[in-house]
Image (tube, helix red, strand yellow):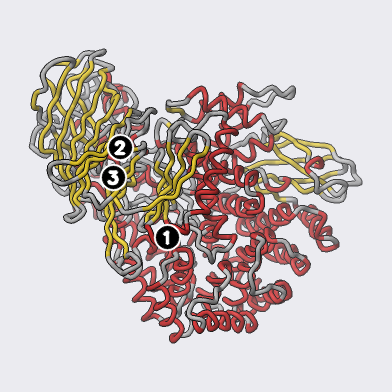
Amino acid sequence: MDPFDSNSTEQANLPRNMIENSMFEEEPDVVDLAKDSTTFPTFPALDPDEVVFEPRSSRLLVRGLGENDMDEDEEDCESSARLLGMSFMNRSSAHRSNSSPYTRQAPPRSCSRPSARTMVVCVLFLVIVASTTMVLYLLPGCTFTKTGCRKMNKTAPIETVYPVSTNGQLFPWAQLRLPQSIRPLSYSLTLNPDLDNMTFTGRTVINMSVLHNTERIVLHSANLSITKATFKLGDGEATDVTVLEYKPRQQIAVKFSEELKAGQYCVLTMDYSATLSHTYDGFYNSSYSDKDGNKRVLAATQFEPLSARKAFPCFDEPAFKATFLIKINRKPNYMTLSNMPKAKSTSLPSGLMEDEFEKTNVNMSTYLVAFIVANFTPISKNVSKTLLSVYSVPEKKEHTEYALDTASKLLEFYNNFFEIDYPLKKLDLVAIPDFLAGAMENWGLITFRETSLLVGKQNSPLEKQVVSSVIAHELAHQWFGNLVTMSWWNDLWLNEGFATYMQYMSLQTVFPQLDIGNLFLTVRFRALDKDALNSSHAVSTEVTTPEQVEEMFDSVSYEKGASILLMLNASLPGDQQFRKGIIQYLKQFSGFNTDTDNLWNSLTQVEVSTQHQNVSEMMSSWTSQKGFPLVTVSRKGDQVTLTQQQFLLTSDNTTHTSSLWNIPVTYVNDSCSLAPECRQVFTLKSKTGTLKLPESVKWLKLNYRNTGFYIVHYGDEGWSALIEALSKNVSVLTPEDRASLIHNIFALSRLGSVSFYQVLSLLNYMSSETETAPVTEALLQLSSLYRLLDKRQENGLVARMKNYILHHFGSLMGKQTWGEEESVSKQELRSALLEMACSLKEENCTRQAKALFKQHVESNGTFQIPGDLQRVVFTVAAQSDEDWVTLLGMYRYATYDAEKRKMLQGLASTQNTQSLAWILKSGLNGDIIQTQELPLVISTVCNGFAGYLFAWDFVQENWGRLIEKFPVGSFAIQTIIKSATSQFSTQAHLDQVQGFFSGLKERGSQMRTVKEALETIRLNRRWIDKNLSKLQKWL
Ligand SMILES: [Zn+2]
C-alpha cells in the first residue's frame, strides 16, 4: 500500500516516526482470569495451537504461572497480573465492543487500590523522601495494602480462561492471533451489494484442511451478521452449526464435540448480511458527482491490513494464503471488477446480473482480495501475456493514457528485472474518486486515488513524477508482497521497504527524465530525522494489537526500509549482485511467506565476492535495532579514526546506548571526489576503526552521495576544511553530497554537537548554489526554524530570519521564471524557492503570483497556471478574502483532482479564522471537501500562525469523530497528530498535549505517534532554550 496521499512535497515533509510501544507500559484492560478461575469458568483441553505462533509476549499465558517463578514474596503481583493478562489485553479500541465481557473487576488477591490511610502515609512519605519517589512509584499496588501479595502456589497449573461469546457461551480461543490447526485452502465468495440501501449480503464457502487435531475452527469476522452456517467433514453431510462470536477481537468460532483429525478436509459455509462501510476500509461505499452534477454511488474495497474480515468471514492473517473464486450480483447498470478476469455473466431471475470471476491461479493473502461495483470505463493494451487496463469514471477517461503507458513500460521492466513474469492474465489500475491511501496493490486490481493515477492535459512533469512513482511502487508489490508475502506485520518492511526502493530504482532506469533521484534523497533525509528520535522503532519489530499493525505503516517500514536496501545495493561489489539475490529470494519463496532472515540469507547465498561480505551479519544490525549511527571523524597525521555511536535526539542527556552497526562507510577526498570511481569503502563494525590517508589530503567527505543511512560529524577542523572548499568552488562535491552536508549539520545542531553558528557558516556558500537538492534541503530546514520562531512570536528574530533567507537565496529566487518549465528538477527548485519567497511576502513573488491568478480567473480557466506553480499562486490568492471566495468557487467546480488539491491547500492557508473554521468543519463533514482530504487540510492549516492553535483545538474537540473516520494508528491519524503538535515548543503546550492524549486511554493514548509528538515538543523547547539568545547575535 502507498499510504501517502501522493503529494511528493508533503510526503517529504511529513514527519512519521513512531515509537516502541511497550506492552508493559499500559495497564491492560483485562480481568485477571488466572487469579480466580471461579469467576470465569475455564475451557478445558489445550491443543497444539495454543503454544505455537503466538507473539513472544503472550506465550506466558498458556505456559502457566508455574513456569514463571512468580512464587517469591517480593514478586510484584501486579506485574504478574500483567503477564497473565497479556493475551487478554485488548487495546483494539476502535473495535472494542461496549458489551465486552472483559470488564475490570477487583482482583481477588489484594492488588486493589491503596486504602485512604495508606495513601496518606504514602503521601507524607513521598514528601519527606523525594529521592525515593521513583522507587515507590514502581512498587506494586499490593505493597500498600494490609495483606500484601498472597503467595502464589508454585505448583498450581495455569488454566487457560476463555472469553464469553456474544451468545453467552464460552468462546474457545483466547488469543489475538489465530490458531494454526486449520488451514484454509480455497474460498468461494458470493456477494450481493445493494447500492440503493448501502447494505450487502454474502455467502462464504471455505475449504480447509486440518493440520493438527482440534475441536474448534477460529477465524475473523467484523461487523457481519451471520445468519446461517453449515459444516461438512470429508464426504459427509453438511449440518447446521452454531457460530460463536467474540467481538473485541473480531473473531468467530465453531466448536465441535468430536475432534477434527489431522489430515481431514472440511468445508464451512456461512451466509451473512452487513452494511457497506462508511469509512475507507472494508467493503465501503462512496459517491461522486458526474459531469451533469448527478450523484453516483460505487462500492469498493480496501482490506490491508485488517479489513477483509469486514467483507467476508476469513482467516485474516497474511500467512493464511488460499485461492479465491468470487461472484458478485449487481444491477444491470453497474459493472464489477475483481482480482481475476471475468469468467461469465449470467442473468438472474431477480433481474440482477451475476458476474463470476475466474478462480485465482495463485494462493493469495486475504488483504489482497478486492472487488468494485461502479460505473467505470477502461482503456487497455496487451503487455506480453497480460491485459493491462486503466479504469476511471467516464468523464476522466482522457486522463488515463499516461498511466497506461507508464504501467506498460514498468510491467515490462519488472518482468525482465525479476525474471519472473507477472502471473495473472490481467492487471487493472483503477482511479477511485473517494480513496484514503495513495494506492493499494490488490493482486490484479490495483486501486488508486485519482491524483495518484490520472494525469490531465494541463499536467506538469511533477504530477507525472507522482503518478509514475505510485504506479512503480504498486507494480513492484505484485512481486514483493503479493507473490512473496511477509509472514506477519512485524516484517511489513519486506513489502513496503522493497516496493519503495524498487519504485525509485525502476524510475531511475525507465524514466530518467523524471529526475526521481532528488525525491529519493529527500525521503532518506526525512527517514533519518524520524529515526533519530527515541520514539522510533526497529525496522522489523514485534506487533500484536490492531493499532500496532496500523502503526507499522510509517516511514520506518517504507523509507528507512528503502534506504537500507539502497545502502546494501551500493555496498555490494558488482551491480548485479543485489539483483541476483532478490531473484533468488523471489524464486525460492514464490507463493509463500517469509521473514527478514529469509531475505538476508538469499542475498548472502549469491554473494560471490572475494572479500566475502556476510549480508545477514551486516543487515541484521540495521533491521533489528532502532535508530542509526553517527560516525565521527578525527584526523591525526595520516591516520583517520572513525567512531560510531547512536545518533539519538533526546531531551534526556543521560541516555546512552551501546548499539553498534555494521556500516559500509564510503568516502571521497579533495584529490578525487565526484566520479563513482573516487569512492572508497571502509567497513566499520566495531566502535572505532582507523584508515590511512596521505597527509596532503585537505578534506574528506564521508557517505558518498548519501547512499548510507548514517550521519557524519567531521569535527571542527573537518567541517572548516569542507566549508572552505565549498566557499571556493561549489562543484568540488556532487549536489547530493552538498545536500547531505547541509542535512547533517542541521541534525548535529539539533543534537547539540555543533553550534548554530557553524550551520550558518556552511550556509554562507549558498549564494553560489543553484542545484535543486542542496537548495531545497536548506530551505526546508530554515523554514522549519522560521515557523518555530514565528509560533513563538519572536517577531524580531522572525524579521531577521526573513532577511537572512532573502539575502542568501534572493538572487536565485529572482532568477526563477513563471512560465512553463519542462525539467522536473527545475520545477522542484523553483516551486521551493517561490513558495518560500511568497510565504515571506517577498514583493516580486506575491505580485507575480497575483498576476497569474488574475489572468487565470479572467480567462475563465482557459489560461493555465503551470502545475508546479499552482500551489504558490493559489496560496497567495487565498490571503485576500475576496480571492479566497473566488478560489472556493473554482474549487467546487474543478474536476481535475491534482489541481483541485492545490486549490484546497491554498484555501487552507488563509489567515482568516472564520474561513479556517469553515474549512476544517467541511473537511470533517465530507460534503464540499472530501474527508479523505482532512489530513492535508489540517497539516496546511497548521503551517500558518492563525491556524495552528485553532487546528489543535479542532483535533481535541473532534477526536471521537476523527477516529471514526480514520482508524487509531493509521497513517491519516499519524499525520493529523504530527501536524497539530510539531510546532509547539513550550512547557504549557507539552502539558496540554500530554494531558489530552493520556486522557484518551484506549482511544489512542498508546500510539507511537503520541510519544513522537511529545518528544518533538521537548526537543523544540530544548533547541529554543539553547539558541534563542544566540540567534539574536548570529542572524
Ligand atoms: Zn506499498
Mark 2, secondary structure of its residue:
helix
Q: Quadrant of the C terminus?
A: bottom right
Looking at the picture, which amino acid does disc 1 mark? Lys
The correct choice, above or below, for 434 with respect to 60 in the image is below
Displayed quadrant of residue 685? top right
Is residue 310 in view? yes
Task: Give me the residue at 25% from left, 13% from top.
Answer: 262
Q: CA distance from mark 1 to mark 2?
A: 59 Å
Looking at the picture, which amino acid does disc 2 mark? Ser
Front tag of 3 and 1: 1
Looking at the picture, which amino acid does disc 3 mark? Arg
Q: Quick one: label 1 or label 2, which is nearer the N terminus? A: 2
**Residue that sits furthest to the right in the current view:** 696
The correct choice, above or below, for 839 with respect to 776 in the image is below
Displayed quadrant of residue 578? top right
Q: Is mark 1 within 8 Å of ligand 1?
A: no
The correct choice, above or below, for 154 with respect to 360 in the image is above
Mark 3, secondary structure of its residue:
loop
Q: Quick one: label 3 or label 1, which is nearer the N terminus? A: 3
The correct choice, above or below, for 598 with respect to 759 in the image is above
- Residue 755 is tagged as none
Mark 1, secondary structure of its residue:
helix
Task: Give me the residue at 63% from left, 63% from top.
Answer: 828
- Residue 91 is tagged as 3
Q: Nearer the viewer, residue 788 or 772?
A: 772
